């Protein structure tokens, strides 16, 4: 039972004695309005005849009481269902309320407005007819069935009298057990003569939740209300007796859980009395904690934090920080996981439907599902999809999530340079937040989502830490079951998460981090695969994006091939999708303007819409001059054709390099030139040429930095071609590094380089014999139409790459000889450098 203050003792509150209250409760008003201003209230219920203070803070409520107090009109006091709703509507209010009049309006020292209202009569709220400037609703007035009404039998009368006496005894018992209720309350109860007013008085002051008080108000018969009230009071007596027993340290049969529950209820009651929000927050946290699935250690840690939080002052700065932290712990899924869909046929169907090609990756995912199905448990591996942009690495993660029936989450790691983005901030810092890993786990609502770490190769570091090092624990299957976020401060199991990282390059990934992941290479697409992807996915997607239907536009296979070959030069399909979008935009304009247009897109229509092709295939097919060789290069965007030019001019043997070459490529030039000078006689090249002609090696596209250990044999071929005046064969490209002794070394990125060569129309490729195993692992349709030459020595490369005869159109080289008798005078004669067939054999294989 709450502290009973009757009559009110404040100087600015009118003095109303119990007799006046009883008379007011027994008087029923006449000519009541059909529509009432509605005052929504929280945490309280007004009963007929009861006078009580209400603090008003909402703008609508302030406007309502101002007008009602000035006009001395009635208001309807209705309790809210949802206490957190600031703008309640009809659905947020209980249907039964109490008609009331404002006795007094008081402005408190803190600026708040408090009104003293007296309940008159119950009513039923049917609808809200007006929202502004305050709520107005239609009401039907209800009359309580008084205890005086009903049967006049002596047995019924005795029953009513016994009920009232029981209620009074229960009230006096509560007063005796409650040391915080003043003795004046007992005098007030003794002076109440009206049974109806007594029941309403005790109902308003009993210590129960608002919903339970509302149920009492909704009971039409005072007799039934009295019976329910007596049950509530008996329950409160039991709790007070338990409290008395605990204080006296007597033996109790209650177990630990019941004691804890009682203590929490006691704390809650006390805090409700003083209007403290701390108790509500603590009880809410305890209730939510009982529903969580977590380990005993985590539960113990959480309860200790709540216990510390319960002792905090709500005005303290750390109060809201600690509350946010505890709510974050409750929002994490902990031991909750979604059930995996282990239908392998369905998974294969989904992967095939959403991604064309990528057979190796699909096979790996099906293997993972197969083991999971047979074993019923499997520590999730850490997969890293490595390949050029636009080949479907990120979207593949979403397909895996769909196939498994798991939640899909993604983090973009590109440019991340703060370690706290992964591990979170310590709670001692202002604005502390958990790391992105834990934030997304909370957002997923499950502990086993598919988690894509996008662009892991683009993580940077600065004075705020190294995110790559922070990822070492996250991506280690042996450690991530005890991952500790700095903000969370307790262990969280990440072993059930299926992490999938994506990267364009492995070189920038920290070696220790790369060692923790299973690298799966995602190569670029062939022309045929791009056409199929466009037919299956891209065209339909762009039609939908531009508001078109299938009848509005269609593409022929020839048109798609024309777009792929003439307007794109990439490993992925992003640029292809942009070109298709451009065509769809042109069609959309014609449809919107009701113009005539060609619905079937042909190569001619493609050229009309997109303009002339951006790439000329012939540029990569013919070497028309000496000193030009075609190499194959790998970039993070896929394979590319690399043209290397060598030119000679009269001088003193100076070497010039251009094209923004990196240190590795500069060393390749030096090694190739040293090998050439050491073996010049094998190619019928005079040594004087190296001293009397300057060599300029250039790689076009000078604005683009170039580096990497794969251009050695291409550099050598271009130099030999320049010195020997023999052109390099058309439609031939090469890749491989060279040593000073002419040994050809293997290189990486073979598949991307082969795709680039095939896109450019290359038919023959020269590479190290040790790269033959890489070719054998590539699917046959990728290398169809290509002829491979596997070599071990530089002589074999030159024998394969150079034509047998010198180029008649090339200007012959001259050697200036010094006369022995006249050192100061020089005689010049023209010397033709006639190349001979070099020594060495080559092996080739055609596919």
Image (tube, helix red, strand yellow):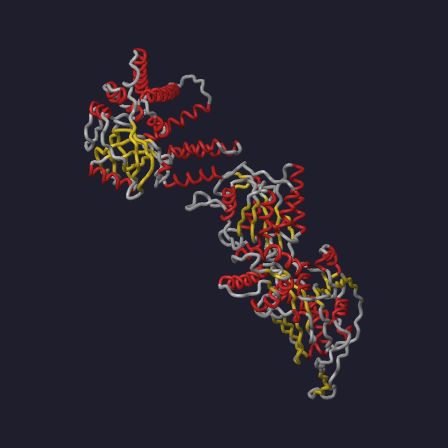
Instruction: Find residue 34 and report its image quarter.
Output: top left
Question: Along the horizontal axis of the image, is 36 left or right of 787?
Answer: left
* Residue 302 placement (x, y as % from top left): 47, 34
* Residue 351 placement (x, y as % from top left): 63, 48
* Residue 618 placement (x, y as % from top left): 66, 71
Nearest the camera: 813 or 170? 170
Task: Tell me the quadrant of the picture where the C terminus can be found.
Answer: bottom right
Q: Is residue 516 visible?
A: no
Instruction: Find residue 742 and report its image quarter.
Output: bottom right
Residue 307 in the image: above or below residue 155: below
Question: Along the horizontal axis of the image, is 149 left or right of 657?
Answer: left
Residue 180 in the image: above or below residue 838: above
Residue 372 in the image: above or below residue 527: above
Nearest the camera: 92 or 148? 148
Instruction: Find residue 653 and report its image quarter.
Output: bottom right
Nearest the camera: 544 or 401? 544
Residue 560 in the image: above or below residue 452: below
Nearest the camera: 253 or 552? 552
Question: Along the horizontal axis of the image, is 820 left or right of 208?
Answer: right
Q: Is residue 277 visible?
A: yes
């Amino acid at each position: 039972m709450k502290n009973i203050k009757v009559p009110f003792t404040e100087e600015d509150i009118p003095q109303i004695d119990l007799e006046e209250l009883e008379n007011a409760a027994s008087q029923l008003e006449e000519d009541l309005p059909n529509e009432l201003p509605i005052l929504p209230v929280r945490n309280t219920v007004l009963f007929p005849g009861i006078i009580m203070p209400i603090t008003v803070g909402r703008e609508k409520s302030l406007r309502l009481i101002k007008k009602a107090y000035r006009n001395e009109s009635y208001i309807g006091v209705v309790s809210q269902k949802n206490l957190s709703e600031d703008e309640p509507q009809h659905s947020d209010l209980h249907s039964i309320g109490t008609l009331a009049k404002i006795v007094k309006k008081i402005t408190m020292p803190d600026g708040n407005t408090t009104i003293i209202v007296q309940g008159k009569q119950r009513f039923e709220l049917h609808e809200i007819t007006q929202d502004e400037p305050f709520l107005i609703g239609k009401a039907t007035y209800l009359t309580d069935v008084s205890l005086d009404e009903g049967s006049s039998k002596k047995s019924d009368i005795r029953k009513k009298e016994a009920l009232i006496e029981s209620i009074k005894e229960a009230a006096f018992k509560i007063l005796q057990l409650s040391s915080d209720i003043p003795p004046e309350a007992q005098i007030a109860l003794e002076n109440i003569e009206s049974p109806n007013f007594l029941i309403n008085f005790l109902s308003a002051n009993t210590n129960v939740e608002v919903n339970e008080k509302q149920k009492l108000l909704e009971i039409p018969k005072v007799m039934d209300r009295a019976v329910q009230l007596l049950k509530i009071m008996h329950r409160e007596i039991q709790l007070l007796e338990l409290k008395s027993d605990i204080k006296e340290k007597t033996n109790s049969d209650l177990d630990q859980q019941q004691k804890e529950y009682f203590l929490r209820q006691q704390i809650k009651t006390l805090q409700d009395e003083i209007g403290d929000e701390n108790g509500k927050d603590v009880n809410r946290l305890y209730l939510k904690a009982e529903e969580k699935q977590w380990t005993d250690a985590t539960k113990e840690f959480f309860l200790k934090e709540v216990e510390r939080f319960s002792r905090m002052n709500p005005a303290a700065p750390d109060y809201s920080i600690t509350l946010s932290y505890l709510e974050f712990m409750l929002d994490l899924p902990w031991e909750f996981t979604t059930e995996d869909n282990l239908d392998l046929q369905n998974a294969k169907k989904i992967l095939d439907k959403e991604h064309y090609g990528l057979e190796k990756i699909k096979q790996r995912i099906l293997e993972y599902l197969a083991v999971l199905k047979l074993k019923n448990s499997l520590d999730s591996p850490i997969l890293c999809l490595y390949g050029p942009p636009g080949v479907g690495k990120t979207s593949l993660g979403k397909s895996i999530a769909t196939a498994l029936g798991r939640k899909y989450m993604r983090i973009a790691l590109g440019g991340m340079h703060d370690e706290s983005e992964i591990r979170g901030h310590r709670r001692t810092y202002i604005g502390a937040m958990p790391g992105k890993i834990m934030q997304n786990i909370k957002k997923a609502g499950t502990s086993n989502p598919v988690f894509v770490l996008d662009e892991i190769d683009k993580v940077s570091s600065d004075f705020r830490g190294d995110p790559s090092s922070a990822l070492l624990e996250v991506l280690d299957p042996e450690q991530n079951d005890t991952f500790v976020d700095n903000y969370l401060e307790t262990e969280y199991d990440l072993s059930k998460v299926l992490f999938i990282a994506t990267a364009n390059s492995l070189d920038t990934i920290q070696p220790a981090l790369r060692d923790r992941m299973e690298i799966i290479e995602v190569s670029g697409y062939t022309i045929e695969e791009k056409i199929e992807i466009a037919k299956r996915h891209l065209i339909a997607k762009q039609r939908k994006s531009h508001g078109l239907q299938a009848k509005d536009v269609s593409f022929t296979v020839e048109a798609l091939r024309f777009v792929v070959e003439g307007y794109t030069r990439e490993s992925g399909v992003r640029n292809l999708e942009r070109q298709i979008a451009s065509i769809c935009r042109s069609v959309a304009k014609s449809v919107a303007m009701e113009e005539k247009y060609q619905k079937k897109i042909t190569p001619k229509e493609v050229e009309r819409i997109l303009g002339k092709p951006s790439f000329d295939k012939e540029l990569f097919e013919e070497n028309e001059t000496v000193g030009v060789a075609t190499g194959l290069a790998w970039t993070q965007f896929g394979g590319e054709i690399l043209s290397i030019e060598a030119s000679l001019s009269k001088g003193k043997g100076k070497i010039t390099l251009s094209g923004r070459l990196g240190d590795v490529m500069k060393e390749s030039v030096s090694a190739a030139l040293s090998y050439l000078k050491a073996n010049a006689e094998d190619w019928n090249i005079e040594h004087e040429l190296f001293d009397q002609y300057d060599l300029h090696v250039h790689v076009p596209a000078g604005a683009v930095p170039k580096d990497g250990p794969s251009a050695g044999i291409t550099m050598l071929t271009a130099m030999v071609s320049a010195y020997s005046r023999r052109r390099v064969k058309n439609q031939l490209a090469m890749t491989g590094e060279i040593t000073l002794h002419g040994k050809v070394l293997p290189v990486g990125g073979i598949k991307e380089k082969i795709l680039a060569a095939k896109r450019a129309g290359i038919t023959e490729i020269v590479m190290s014999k040790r790269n033959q195993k890489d070719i054998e692992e590539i699917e046959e349709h990728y290398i169809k139409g290509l002829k491979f030459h596997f070599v071990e020595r530089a002589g074999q490369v030159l024998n394969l790459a150079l034509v047998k005869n010198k180029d008649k159109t090339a200007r012959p080289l001259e050697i200036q000889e010094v006369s022995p008798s006249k050192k100061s005078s020089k005689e010049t004669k023209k010397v033709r450098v006639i190349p001979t067939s070099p020594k060495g054999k080559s092996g080739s294989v055609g596919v």
